[in-house]
Image (cartoon, grey):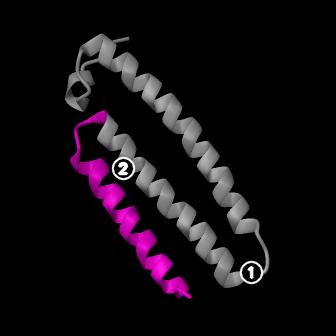
Amino acid sequence: MVPVECYFVLSALLFFIGVFGFITRRNLIAMLISIELVLNSVDINFAAFNRMLYPGEMEGFFFTLFSIGVSAAESAVAIAIIINVYRRFHSDQVNSIENMKF
């Protein structure tokens, strides 16, 4: 059986990779993937804390499933926005949409 601390280390690693990817990337799709990595690290934390604090109960896993559903909806909306930005500016780079006007 894998110790719970290994899940925390994996979660921290995913979180920092996601934050680093979000800060350094200029591609909107890569930034969305980085946000998804951060959300996946939160899901791992939910499951690991549930396993550590309440081993016989399932609340952490239900929070994880709810979070995955919210992440899927967020990804769908973000991809729709990225497609509209690409149609308007013919680029998926962040610096191409910095000069948007109302």
What span is in magenta?
1-28
Q: Residue furthest right?
A: 57
Q: Looking at the figure, which quarter contains the C terminus?
A: top left
Residue at (28%, 52%) from the top-left corner?
21
Residue at (69%, 67%) from the top-left corner?
60
* Three-letter residue code for mark 2: Ser
Residue at (37%, 45%) from the top-left corner?
33
Quadrant location of residue 99?
Answer: top left
Q: Is residue 31 left or right of residue 53?
A: left
Q: Main secondary structure of the magenta part?
A: helix
Q: Position of residue 2 (x, y in %)?
A: 52, 86
User: How many numbered dots are placed on residues in this image?
Assistant: 2
Asked if 51 appears above or below 87 in the picture, the reply is below
Q: Is residue 60 left or right of residue 34?
A: right
Residue 27 within the segment the image draws in magenta:
yes
Numbered label attached to residue 54: 1
Quadrant location of residue 55?
Answer: bottom right
Numbered label attached to residue 34: 2
Q: Position of residue 35 (x, y in %)?
A: 41, 48
Name the element at disc 1: loop
* Labels 1 and 2: the sequence-earlier one: 2
